[in-house]
Amino acid sequence: MECTVSWTGALGTRSGMGFVAETGSGHTLMMDGAPDAAKPENGGLNLAPRPLETLLAGTGGCTAYDVVLILKRGRHDVRGCSVKLDAERANTDPKVFTRINMHFTVTGKGIPAAAVERAIAMSHDKYCSASVMLGKTAAITTSFEVLEA
């Protein structure tokens, strides 16, 4: 796996904190820093997600992918899956994630809660590389609800 991240500056200038990531699979992802009122030249323009927001989003994508795949392999009629991630970071540098809660909402026909609970646990404990890595610094908790389609 590879990725190249390049500083874009702000709208073609060499100020600002915009970046573009070009992934090995041929896709691009924009990122930007938060505006800095005290030193505008050091801040972003709020034109794209922050780098750590993309890390959190990637973790959500990784674990939701696992949950859907595990449920489908179990022949469950999955119609939808979303995960809301709520995270806290350390107050001092490096401001790593210290707590993350993942709340899953799974929609389908006749999906037992036990199957969803098992899929989430399997993702969290074994398959989702991103959450396993973040679990080295953050306490990760999960919750879920199952909605009938």
Image: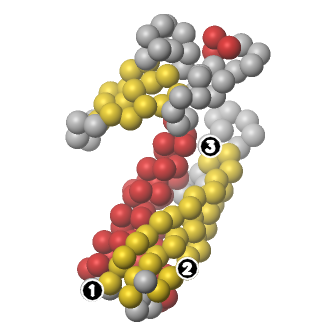
Q: Position of residue 76 (x, y in %)?
A: 32, 85
Residue at the disc numbered 3: 96
Q: Secondary structure at mark 2?
A: strand
Along the viewing direction, whichever of 136 and 113 lies nearer the viewer: 113
Q: Position of residue 139 (x, y in %)?
A: 63, 60
Residue placed furthest toward the top:
14
The amino acid on which the numbered mark 2 sits, given as a three-letter code, is: Glu
Q: Please tell me which of labels 2 and 3 falls first in the chain.
A: 3
Q: Secondary structure at mark 1?
A: loop
Residue at the disc numbered 2: 145
In this rendering, is residue 76 above or below 137?
Answer: below
Q: Residue at x 66, y 24 (%)?
A: 35
For residue 127, say whether it is visible: no
Q: Please tell me which of labels 1 and 2 falls first in the chain.
A: 1
Q: Is residue 20 left or right of residue 96?
A: left
The amino acid on which the numbered mark 3 sits, given as a three-letter code, is: Val
Q: Position of residue 77 (x, y in %)?
A: 32, 84
Q: If the image is split into quadrants, where does the C terminus sit? A: bottom left
Q: Residue at x 62, y 43 (%)?
A: 96
Along the viewing direction, whichever of 78 and 119 lies nearer the viewer: 78
In this rendering, is residue 38 above or below 109?
Answer: above
What is the CA distance from the residue labelled 1 to the residue labelled 2? Answer: 19 Å
Q: Please tell me which of labels 3 and 1 falls first in the chain.
A: 1
* Residue 62 position by quadrant: bottom left
Q: If the image is split into quadrants, where does the N terminus sit? A: top left
What is the CA distance from the residue labelled 3 to the residue labelled 1? Answer: 38 Å
Residue at the disc numbered 1: 75
Q: Residue at x 36, y 67 (%)?
A: 66
Q: Which mark is residue 6?
A: none
For residue 61, say whether it is visible: yes
